[in-house]
Amino acid sequence: MQSRYVSTLINAGFTLLELLCVLALLGALAAMAAPAMRDWLARDQVEMQAQALLATLAYARGEAIRRAIRVTLCRDDGHGRCCANHKPLSTMELNNWARGYLVLAELPPCLTEPSRAQILRMQPPIEAVTIQSVSAPLSFTPPAGQIIGGFRSFEIGARTTALGPYGVRACRCVRVAAGGRSRIFNGPCAAAPHSRF
């Protein structure tokens, strides 16, 4: 009788071989899931920054209407001022709004100060994405928040080569109509329609 209890205790639990097999399977599953997770995170960053830019554009237009003054969206030079277009940068970096951007309210001039601007909102630099557009500032004017210069497009893309569905690079296009309304389109700006506002 005593031997029966001893054999039961010896057979309880997992063997080292079983444990190693389970760990190897878990490691293989994690290795297969890592690239998909990285691509998903990159696509999520692109979508999040597109939504943030859309909200900033709507805010700037709303402030131009509410305050009845000109409100400008411009690239940040890193010191809380609008970036000059003549800085020695590559064309890719010159047009990259992911280096940070500002929303400025252009206050009316007074006798002591010729012209000044109040920073309403500041977007810090974004490392995960690029935001490509022309480097010139975008101004919303009262009374209806129209922009100066016609249509404007911002293409937000991942810095990595993350692929979206169907093998297309993860990117979004934010288009601003001449009337100041903004919309997000899937894919690059070259493929986004011009007439759907």
Image (spheres, rainbow, N blue to C red):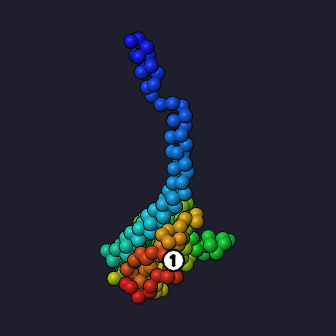
Residue 125 picture location, percent across and down = 53, 61
What amino acid type should be assigned to the residue bearing mark 1?
Pro
Q: Residue at x 41, y 68 (%)?
A: 51
Q: Residue at x 40, y 77 (%)?
A: 183
| Residue 21 in view in this figure | yes
Dot 1: element: loop
Residue 101 picture location, percent across and down = 50, 67
Q: Is residue 34 above or below residue 65?
A: above
What count of labels does the image hold? 1
Relative to the observer, which residue lies in front, 56 or 17?
17
* Residue sitting at the far front: 1
Q: Is residue 193 above or below residue 100?
A: below
Q: Is residue 153 above or below residue 77?
A: below
Relative to the observer, which residue lies in front, 169 or 130?
169
| Residue 119 in view in this figure | no
The image quadrant that residue 176 belongs to is bottom left
Q: Is residue 120 left or right of residue 170?
A: left
Quarter of the image for the C terminus: give it: bottom left
Q: Residue at x 55, y 37 (%)?
A: 20
Q: Which residue is mark 1?
A: 188
Quarter of the image for the N terminus: give it: top left
Badge 1, how many Cα within 10 Å: few under 14, some, many 20+? some
Residue 99 picture location, percent across and down = 55, 65
* Residue sitting at the far left: 66
